[in-house]
Image: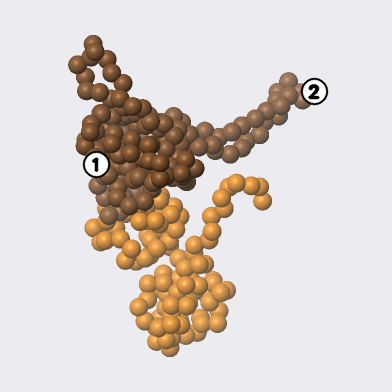
Chain colours: A brown, B orange
Amino acid sequence: MPKTSDAVSQACSKLEVQIRCTGTWYDVGGEMNTVSNTKETRDVGSLPVFNDSRHVTAGGKRPPLTVTFSGVYSEVVTEAFTLMMDLWEDAGVSDCDKQLCVRWTPKGGSVGDYRFEMTDNPQFVGFMYPPLDAGSADPIGFEFDVFGYIDSAVIVS
Amino acid sequence: MLLRARGNLSNGIKRGEMFTDDRLSPSTTELLLKRGVIARATTPPLRKIVQLVDVLGVLESAGVATLEDLIVAKAVAGLTAAELIGWQSVATSVMNVEKPCGCRRK
């Protein structure tokens, strides 16, 4: 097989968030710079038995995973840090229902591109207030975490 | 045109689902066909479908030969609009066999 001609740069992706998984999708690509997810896995188990040197194995379900999103601290109300902080601190939102939908498109979001989205009641489980370092000239960063599943879809409009 | 999704689509069409091309714009249909995200659905002759036996004569007289012909038909001689919608619904359900969740053994 010839080598692929469809490799995708990581640098020009699109990232959007939807607070409480309802209403406006905010394009936060101007502030965010990293999506750090781990492999989705399946539970498996094994037990040894007396008559064989190998375990008996079994397969199970796919547990949810935590995805970490990193970006730049800013104080604009429609930008990522403030949107996340408002949701994190919002006393009107039950702690049992802090949903946060996030979706990202590696190729940038055109029709035909794959889009990955956190689904199945994705929960906002981690928020980092701005850390500081007097020895750094970099912009201040921050992170937030979402716990849920990732589904894929091809953008059609 | 009758199409089948090979992957989930952002308008809610799920992997494996069959749909008519009016769910997508012509340019999107062309692009997704080219990329293999969707494919033309092949459908069996109506005679193979036991759920349609009661209406088979009417459909064949009207020149409707396959499930695709029935599903995309705007009108069929001998059927009212409501009847046509009802039979199209039957035809669609025949093609969209519910995919098992894979969460338990049969």
Does residue A117 appear anywhere in the picture?
no
Q: Position of residue A114 (x, y in %)?
A: 33, 44
Give above or below for A97 relative to A157. above
Between residues A34 and B99, which one lies in front from this camera angle?
Answer: A34
Going by the picture, which residue comes out furthest to the top? A135
The outermost residue toward the right is A50
Circle 1 — which element?
loop
Tell which subunit mark 2 falls on: A
In the image, are marks 2 and 1 on the same chain? yes
Q: Which residue appears at 37% of the width and 76% of the height?
A: B73
| Closer to us: A84 or A156 | A84
Question: In this rendering, which labeled residue sits more in front, label 2 or label 1?
Answer: 1
**Which quadrant of the figure has residue A140?**
top left
Parent chain of label 1: A
Label 2: few (<14), some (14–19) or many (≥20) C-alpha neighbours in 10 Å: few
Q: Residue furthest front?
A: A91
Residue holding disc 1:
A78
Is B87 situated left or right of A30 in this image?
A: right
* Of the image marks 2 and 1, the number of the one nearer the N terminus: 2
Instruction: Kindly identify which residue carries mark 2.
Output: A50
Q: Secondary structure at mark 2?
A: loop
The amino acid beneath tag 2 is: Phe
State how far apart marks 2 and 1 are (Cα): 62 Å
**Spot occupied by residue A98 in the image (x, y as percentages of width and height):** 43, 42
Residue sitting at 52 percent across and 33 percent down? Answer: A41
Q: Is residue A34 above or below residue B70?
A: above
Q: Where is A98 relative to A142, above or below? A: below
Q: What type is the residue that disc 1 sits on?
A: Thr
